[in-house]
Amino acid sequence: MGLRTDMLRPEELATLKLRGIYEQYGYKKYRMGRFEEYSLYAKNQSFLASENIITFTDLDGKLLALKPDVTLSIIKNSQTSRQSREKLYYIESVYRENKESHTYREISQMGLEILGDVDLYAVTEVLTLAERSLAQFSDQYLLEISNMDFVTGLMEDMELDDRKTQELLSLIRSKNVFELKNAAQAARLSRRECDDLGVLPTLYGAFPQTLKKAKKMVKNRTMERAIGDLERIYAGMKAAGTAKKLQLDFSLLNDIDYYNGIIFQGYLEQLPRNVLAGGQYDGMVKKLGKDCGGIGFAVYLSEMGRMPLPARKWDVEAMILYGEDTDMKELTAQVQKLTRKGLRVRAERSVPPQMRAETVYRLENGALKQIPVKEEGSDDA
Amino acid sequence: MLNIALPKGRLGDQVYELLSSIGYDCKSIYEQNRKLIFENPKNNVRYLLVKPSDVAIYVEHHAADVGIVGRDILLENRPDVYELLDLGLGKCRMCVAARSGYIEDKDRPLRVATKFVNIAKQYYADQNRDIDIIKLNGSIELAPILGLSDVIVDIVESGNTIRENDLRVIEEFLPISARFIANKTSFKFQNQIIREMVEKLTDAVKEQNI
């Protein structure tokens, strides 16, 4: 009898499948410790989702933190250069603040990174794997892509200070066209520039059509190259058969100090937030003193755990009731026989409350005799 | 079926009128009862009546696909949603108010009573002013009268409550109005329906302003 996988939760099953896929593409599993020196995070706070980190002093006096993020540790420990390429995947817990309940939470993540020589092929491969990862969870999914260089290229000639840039980016991110135009006007941008910015949040939808619209906005080399890259990536993903659920969304933006180029997010129809996020983070790699590129993504397994599941009818398929004088040898043999058939079996003296068994047997004279199952709600009878 | 979170109260009534005028009506909402969900399968809409400050929570968590919420609540709680349109309804201002005749002593931290802790903190942080926040949930105007705080930060619509309690507005710093928001997942998977709604609303809002 093979392994029964129907007892696994969807995220557990997907973890196994994803490992298989990532290994097929030559990624190596990477395992790390739970702790990291706090200074790594203190220096790179805006790379993290939240400033709050669980810290403690180790016995030797070092200030450590429970990892709020995996990527930083991977970059820090990497020995790669531009000439080589390191391909890794991981399944780890991270500890982050839950803003709503204002408490810390342990979050389970699975992710994948390429460090070193990140060319267009590497980007396409990572996107393909992101798409295939989403497909493991549901048929109703979307992978949204943007090229941040397109947006930074558009803002290149606007001569905005840091604060204003951040304000405009945040408004683009929330697709707030009205407020975005107001803020652009307040920054004394020309009418044309205000209109261009106002179009960004609406550049959303199916890949080819949206790309066509974006192409018309190209103003300089940076933007031209951004569009060219997207075109080639799309062609690559089409060849891999992973382009069907791709969407372009130019309002998708990350912190421009750390991220550049391609960024992406994955959504499942049943879940309120994105369940996958990733992108190129050359800026972060440079900040940590390495001369190479980086790209990767994380799948939020904890978030996946909220997927609605079909209600289970039974807790076990078979329950064997036995008495004081039952022969243990016979009982064990019967349990063994049923489990060999692939059934879930419980041997009990009486039916435990809140326990639903498909069939209930009584062991009498070495043989199993089926007895009628009580209707639900009559447990206490 | 699109789930729309409507804030209970006057703003919700105004928004419903607006939505109903552009083809999203649901007559059963006028029935006098305590129901909180009303749907019209013909128009493919379901209205959920929720507390105004909870609208963004319903939308962020995907219990509603879209919703209508005041800008004050968006700025205070910063939910992770798309803010698609300014409906221009429920206009008011976020203000600082104090007792008439109040003179600020800049040599000590300012005591600020408010429902909007984050907005108040941000406002004073921008001015580098040290403050003590006193979080209240209602009848904010009482605080300066009883000496609980020096000033209050609150929404002012007509200014009647402020005047009747012998307070005056010192500064208006944020214009507020109702915003049309959407859950990020819904925006992607029900894009056609939501886009159409936003377009119709945009036209209706323009018409109203003329």
Image (spheres, coloured by chain):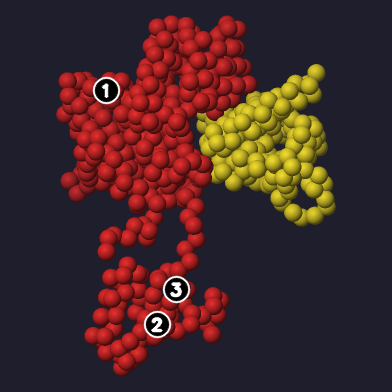
Q: Which residue is rendered at x = 35% and y = 51% of the image?
A: A13
Of the pair B203 and A211, the residue shown nearer to us: A211
User: Dot 3 surroundings within 10 Å: few (below 14), some, or many (20 or more)?
Assistant: some
Looking at the rendering, in which quadrant would you find the N terminus of chain A? bottom left
Q: Amino acid at mark 2?
A: Tyr
- Give how far apart the Cα atoms at labels 1 and 3 are: 54 Å
Query: Mark 3 belongs to which subunit?
Result: A
Q: Secondary structure at mark 3?
A: strand
Residue A175, compared with residue A213, is above or below; it is below
**Residue on which disc 2 sits:** A361
| Label number found at residue A212 | none
- Name the N-terminal-most of marks 1 and 3: 1
Q: Residues within 10 Å of mark 2 (few under 14, many from 20)?
A: some
Question: Picture coordinates of residue A311 (x, y %)?
Answer: 50, 61
- State yes or no: discs 1 and 2 in contact (Cβ < 8 Å): no
Relative placement, left or right, of B135 versus A288 is: right
Residue type at mark 1 is: Val
Q: Nearer the viewer, residue A108 or A35?
A: A108
The image position of residue A243, as x and y in percent, is: 42, 29
Q: Colour of chain B?
A: yellow
- Name the front one of labels 1 and 3: 3
Q: Which mark is residue A118?
A: 1
The local crowd at label 1, few if under 14, some if 14 to 19, many if 20 or more residues have their Cα within 10 Å, is many
* Chain rendered red: A
